[in-house]
Image (cartoon, coloured by chain):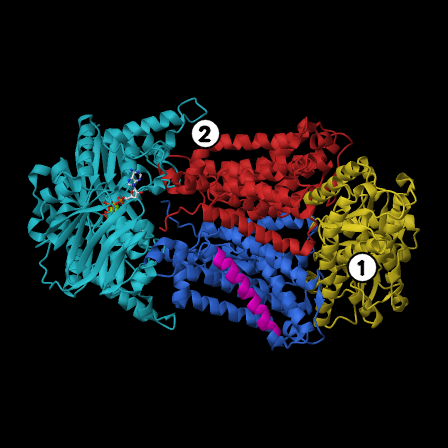
Chain colours: A yellow, B red, C blue, D cyan
Amino acid sequence: APAVSESAESSASASEAAEASQPAADGEGKTFKIGFAQKTMDNPFFLALANAIQEEGEKRGWTVSVLDAKNSLETEMANMETFVSQGMDLIFLNTIDSEGAIPEVQAATAAGIPVIELDSGISPDAGVVTTVFSDNRGNGRKVGLYAATCYDEGETISSVILSGDKGNPGGEDRRMGLFCGIIEARAGLTEEEAWVEAEKFNQELTDNGKAFHEAANFEVLGQGWAHWTADDGLPAMEDLLVANPNINCVLGENDNMLIGGMEALRAVDKLEQVQMFAACDGQKEALALIQQGTSYKASGENNPNKVAELGYQIAEEILVEGKDPTSYPEESHTDAVAITPENVDELYDPNAIF
Amino acid sequence: MKKATFFLKKYSTYIIFLVAVLICIAISPDFFTPTNIVNIGRQYAGLIIVSMGMLFVILTGGIDLSVGSIVALGSVITATCLVAGMSLGVAMMIALLCGILCGIITGVLVSYAKMAPFIASMAMMTMARGVAFVISNGSPIPTPEGSIIWLGTGAVGVIPTLVIIAVAVVVAFWFMQNYTSFGRIVIAIGSNETAVRLAGIRVKLYKTGVYVISGLCCALAGILLCSRTAIGSPVVGEGMELDAIAACVIGGASLSGGEGSAVKAVIGVLILALIGNIMNLLAVPSYPQDIIKGIIIVASVLLQTLTSSNKKEA
Amino acid sequence: MKKATFFLKKYSTYIIFLVAVLICIAISPDFFTPTNIVNIGRQYAGLIIVSMGMLFVILTGGIDLSVGSIVALGSVITATCLVAGMSLGVAMMIALLCGILCGIITGVLVSYAKMAPFIASMAMMTMARGVAFVISNGSPIPTPEGSIIWLGTGAVGVIPTLVIIAVAVVVAFWFMQNYTSFGRIVIAIGSNETAVRLAGIRVKLYKTGVYVISGLCCALAGILLCSRTAIGSPVVGEGMELDAIAACVIGGASLSGGEGSAVKAVIGVLILALIGNIMNLLAVPSYPQDIIKGIIIVASVLLQTLTSSNKKEA
Amino acid sequence: MDTTYRVQMEGIYKSYKGVHALTDVSFAVKPGEIHALVGENGAGKSTLMKVLSGAIAADKGSIKIDGVERNITSPRISRDLGISIIYQEFMLAPHLTVAENIYIDRLVGKNKLMINWKKLKKDSHDLLEKLGFSEIDPDEKVGNLSVAYQQVVEICKSLSRDARVLVLDEPSAVLTFTEIQKLFKLIRQLKEQGIAIVYISHRMDEIFDLCDTVTVLKDGHFVNEFRIDEIDKKSLIYQMVGRELSQLFPKRNAKIGETILKAEHLKAGRMVNDVSFNVHKGEVLGFSGLVGAGRTETMRSLFGADKLDSGSITYKGQKILFKDPHAAVRHGVGLLSEDRKQQGIVIERTIRENTTLTSLGKVSKFGIINHKKDKEFTRDILARLTTKYGDMEDSVSCLSGGNQQKVSLAKWLAADCEVIILDEPTRGVDVGAKAEIYKNINDLAEAGVAVIMVSSEMEEVINMCDRVVVMRQGKVVGELEKKDMNDKNIIGLSMGVM
Ligand SMILES: Nc1ncnc2c1ncn2[C@@H]1O[C@H](COP(=O)(O)OP(=O)(O)OP(=O)(O)O)[C@@H](O)[C@H]1O
Ligand SMILES: Nc1ncnc2c1ncn2[C@@H]1O[C@H](COP(=O)(O)OP(=O)(O)OP(=O)(O)O)[C@@H](O)[C@H]1O
Ligand SMILES: [Mg+2]
Ligand SMILES: [Mg+2]
């Protein structure tokens, strides 16, 4: 637990220090107060992101305070309001809901505090500086494109999908990305056309619980809700396997759920027959599996360190160099990358927290 | 001396709350600022309203787990109606009616079909959430520009509109509990249902009534939540039932019915609010926060039971 | 004729369950396959064990909201110990002791400090989850290869080890409830605590006892969950309290205490299991799933109350 | 059409799970008549009245009110017909105040929205005053009142309704002579006003004192109806019990031994204020006094059920304080509570479980219950009290009030106490059963057990006790030996006029 307790001390003492030295806070080479309103910490990715934000800040000698909304919109609003009343210089936000924090962001901006959105999508109405993504859709699509190459042309891709939580926009983006990539490659469409098809495909899945794309020769036979965890991924996969014993593909909205689902495949000796693709995270356990040449084939890179780095780069431009916060594009992506057996060696770091 | 202990016992909930406020003021300079107070008010207006409905259900000895889902349903329906071009008034009407409908279903299952309130309201929790998902197709629904946000961000002087609405609801419940036969009979039902039935009172009607009122409160809270963010979301209000029940119980309500007070339930909400707020202000790291929160809840309730333990050992 | 209705009333829970099974068999050819049955057994072994502990708490008229968090704590502690190189036996011991400790705290708060079980266990829910997060630093903990997975995937013949453990626990509770003075006193406390106290029985000790037993069951379930995926996770078991309580209530337990049966609580779990399983098998679209689930719960409980409604109107 | 009767019940049948509680029972009351309904415990008296009040539905039969046939399917209908009933089990909401309970169904006046608290309190106070209980505060929560005062509230509740038919199901069981006299005065006034009154009681004196007519039920059947001047006590008992009752108070041959328990200067709460007494082995010590004299509280604090503020107890020669009932029971002291339903029995559990609650150790080994032994043990103990029950696996709630009392007592007989405190042991018990309970008390005393009997029934105290302690306002005001024991002395002491 060192990472957390460290940040506790530093942020608590930091806010006191900042309180005392407020008048001196502007100008060059000075220290800045940064707030990070994180949506949840119940998942290694978000933990790693919070740590990365903390570390990048400390590298620069700034003080960073992290608040966790625990997936509650109400708490998120409270957190944002807290930062505004504490007079932060800049706020990083990872919002729960794309529309959820608009008034709070607007209030912060009105108080002269720029807000940079991290990771999750936010409505353009909010008026954040920019949203720094590891591009969920892009990652999904890259993985989907790769998945398409793992099957013969005439072979039907018979899949099931493990989804996170109902109504989660990030999950939906990842899911659609996967569909888009597979359809794009297999049906020979342009990216733009493929997105349209993916959207239709996803709606079909929502309405009927199954979906089939003829041109791509691609079907999703069932969707299990596994709340982002391995523990729920396992039973969901077990049930899906009973109903669909002949699948050859498992898609997932993150790595954890697939890692759980893998146990179900192992139990019925289907690891040979089924290949697994996660739209997201590239967490180290998954990378290890990819490296070992198992049927876990690919994961989208969602590197928290890269997101934090890009976020601070922009923050510095605004706070130190005085760049106009409204001059940024809506989205700033870290590059979408599919981690596959081909490139896993470069990207795998067994000592990462995530 | 005697009088002092009596005073202490009667007002222990309030005293604990005051002490908590003083502690917060002492440990965080940000706490007692107008912005922060207004923030707390805005943030917890919804929970206060939901807790009022919950209190009446609890008074009859029931429980309503469906509150969070009905809040979500209310929020989604309001947004959908606004998107369809209806006026805010009509949209609110429809949302409130849906809340009432949910309440009627739960109430009828409990009173007439004699289902355990826990199960009936749990089924309603699942169903209302499902309906909210179906209506919204699983995604948040942004409302048309300017259609509702003024309600959530508005204020009369410094007092946010949301707070005014919440206070009005609390006053209404306080009045209902203390000055109407409905309120007293609700308590009597929780205290001894058979006695009330044998007094020739239509117990089933009253019991259905409290769930309807709870549904109505939830829908209202849903509208207010929607007005804060200007979006209707099918995922809001998850876990709200626990907070609402906890607020009532911290405010002295008994889950077996017959005991509880509207004003004290509000204090219960505020104690929960304080705990959340102060930890954020102090930037307590997220994981130990849970532990500290648990300890504070235990401590505050313990202090209350200790100061008010005049109960006979019977 | 009379005998037939009596039979129907007494065994209504089982009959409803059988009917549900038959319906499942009829609508899905995959349902009644050995793999699926074994899967259900594995998936719900944990919940069955947790429900047993919950049942005893409910029998005394209490409630334990902390179960899911203690499950997570048990899972995290087991994994942490295994990673630290301890043997599975020692790791399990430590996890079970932690469960007992949590139970003691809740139990003492309820019995000796007279705190409402809802609040005491809610505080414990928050605290245990917090501790699980702190220990695991918020991330799942993979256990060393081969240290525990054999437990989760193992089987004796076709029967999974997890199912055997769950059955053993159920038998133990059934025995406890029907053949020991502990069980009898627990039920009596739930029916009339005062009378039991005045009969010279140490009610506080027994009341603490049920929370300890519940904590122990949760820790065991946590170990088993960890053994399934070979990962200790601080987020497992969220919302498990609702499922466990629902299982007990579907199995005829009354939340005001004094009523409930271990075997019927298992049937309660299985009814919930059936609902979840059949929806996955049939690939019911996600959003309406919740609505259907709610309706099935209502229907099954309603059928039960209707067939067994010999309760006097007094 | 026969309008001479206010209520006519004809051919009423009611059975519970095969138990025939009522079989072809007919019953009629005239306006201005006080009609007693008597019978053994479980004869069906309460059931018959519950049918009249709409609390339960009869299987068969007709009810006419003022000659018009009525279908009473709910309490609401019977209330609207002017039928008011005081149930044997209290029907009060403990969390509400006295005033609210009395006016529960009329909290707001017609066409009003708000409760007028002032008027409500005043009305309640007037009503209580009329009954002679102005000491009861209309603002007090009913849950805080003693059982006796709860009974008074219950009476007020029915009287407040301007009833045309008033049913009182054992209203006097927890009252003492002074309250009973107040109650009788009131009932006679109501009779003058032409109200039809049904009075259920197991106290023979009251029936002959108050009533005009008496109907006897036995085992759910109508036995006979008499004008009260046609019959005497002995033959009425014969009609009820079906045999000659040789002696209500059997002879006792107990040797009074050494002092076993000595209480000195006990103080507890408001109600126990310096109480001292002692009791010997083989002795039956009575406690008498008015309602609220603090007898119950004294016993509870002695037993460890309530906190004892100060005072000392010497038990078997050793100073000891029982910190909780467990400690008391372990040392061989038992307490039969006066509040049977709230504190005496576990009403939803079976007869067997209730009976062996205090003696689980005897029927179990290592905490595992031997069911065979348990059953035999239960059967024997219940047989000693000639308890009437169908199956010992039925819940106690299926028993009639008197039989519930016997189960409650059986529990303490099973515990092998050396000192047994019986608070109103014969509350609601029929004459036949009373004789058996007295016989058992004698058996206990003969076996050397010290029996403390708190009782409000004068006859019982005088005939059963070796000595009687009289309490008043939390203090012991006198102790009477057998020779000085008579109505006059006891009443005088308890009212403070002596
Ligand atoms: N709810 C019930 N369930 C089953 N049997 C019942 C129930 N209520 C009463 N009985 C049975 O009906 C019969 C009549 O009971 P009732 O209470 O009318 O007797 P009672 O004459 O009022 O006796 P007591 O003088 O003891 O009050 C008894 O045999 C009793 O066991
Ligand atoms: N004026 C009053 N108002 C309210 N409560 C009272 C009043 N007087 C006494 N009490 C309550 O009554 C109880 C004591 O009376 P209780 O009738 O139990 O004594 P007792 O001598 O055992 O009488 P009983 O003759 O019924 O056995 C106490 O709990 C006390 O709080
Ligand atoms: Mg009776
Ligand atoms: Mg008394």
Question: Which numbered circle lies on residue D278?
Answer: none
Amino acid, disc 1:
Asp
Q: Residues within 10 Å of mark 1 (few under 14, many from 20)?
A: many
Residue lying at 71% horizontally and 59% vertically, measured from the top left:
A5
- Mark yes or no: residue C32 visible: no
Q: Which residues are magenta?
A: C91-109
Horizontal and vertical percent position of residue C238: 63, 56
Distance between the alpha carbons at the discs numbered 1 and 2: 58 Å
Mark 2 Cα-neighbour bin, 10 Å: few <14, some 14–19, many ≥20: some
Image height check: is C146 above or below A9? below
Quarter of the picture containing the N terminus of chain B is: top left
Which residue lies at the image location 46% right of the left edge and 61% below the top edge? Answer: C208
Secondary element type, mark 1 = loop
Give the amino acid type for the residue marked by disc 2 in the picture: Thr
Q: Chain of mark 1?
A: A
Marker disc for residue B180:
2
- Residue D305, by quadrant, is bottom left
Q: Provide the residue designation for mark 1.
A: A281
* Residue D387 in the image, given as x and y percentages of width and height: 23, 58
Q: Position of residue D421 (x, y in %)?
A: 23, 56
Q: Nearer the viewer, residue C92 or B216?
A: C92
Q: Is residue A158 visible?
A: yes
Q: Residue at x 26, y 49 (%)?
A: D296
Give the overall secondary structure of the magenta segment.
helix
User: Marks 1 and 2: CB-CB under 8 Å?
Assistant: no
Indicate left or right for B82 with B4 as reference.
right
Name the subunit of mark 2: B
Lateral position of residue A33 relative to residue B294, left or right: right
Left or right of D348, for residue D466: left
